[in-house]
Amino acid sequence: MRLTEMLEQLWKSHRSQLLLLGTLLVLNLLFFTALEQLLDPRVVEQESRFLQRQTEVRRLLHKQSVIAKSPAQLYVLASQDLAKFQQAVPDYQDFTGLIEELLVLSNRAGLNISQISYGSEELQESSLLQFSLNFNVVGDYKKIKKFINSLEQSARLITIRQISLQSADNNGVNLRLNLETFFRQGGSES
């Protein structure tokens, strides 16, 4: 049998089912086109509006949580923040770990620190030691930027107090950095 003969026989024996199937196919295509043209833009618009409103609500809740605190709530929050800070401050015994970390970070950035000077001061109100560290780094802008970024990302409590340009030439930029950090006195060997 040829294909045309098979199709004719199929048409004769199942004409009503084929017409129904064709009608359903056309209706399905019309329904799909209507959804694409009418509903999809509305869904995208509603989703965009929802995301904007969600962002606004988060912003308002954040402002409200910062502003609408009673003195007692503020005291509790400050106490919690202070406890977190004190937990993040290492013992004085970890001072060599700080120096090692500075050397590792500078080495990763392709810089060399040859000398670090430091001084410490005992903070009377908190029984902490405040350390000030000074050193120079020489290199191109990209390496220095990478080093400073790694200092900022460090898990240690390090504050970059001052960056001063010492010189600039074909070898790169020579920067003087002044850092500040804290240690607990518990492990000091005074």
Image (cartoon, rainbow, N blue to C red):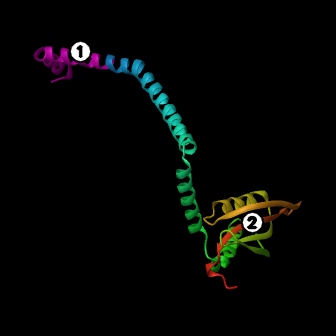
Give how far across and how far down residue 49 sits, in percent. 49, 28
Is residue 114 shown to the viewer in this render? no
Q: What stretch is highlighted in magenta?
A: 1-29
Say if the magenta span includes residue 135.
no
Quarter assignment of residue 181: bottom right
Answer left or right for 31 relative to 185.
left
The disc at residue 179 is 2
Q: Residue at x 76, y 61 (%)?
A: 161
Give how far across and how far down residue 169 sits, in percent. 89, 60
Is residue 39 shown to the viewer in this render? yes
In depth, the one of 182 and 158 nearer the eye is: 182
Residue under label 1: 23
The disc at residue 114 is none
Say if the magenta span includes residue 15.
yes
Answer left or right for 139 relative to 14.
right
In depth, the one of 64 and 36 nearer the eye is: 64
In depth, the one of 105 and 56 nearer the eye is: 56
Quarter of the image for the N terminus: give it.
top left
Give how far across and how far down residue 142 sits, in percent. 74, 57
Task: Determine whether 111 is above or below 2 in the image.
Answer: below
SS at mark 2 in the image: strand
SS at mark 1 in the image: helix
Of callouts 2 and 1, the N-terminal one: 1
Residue type at tag 2: Leu
Task: Determine whether 168 is above or below 71 in the image.
Answer: below
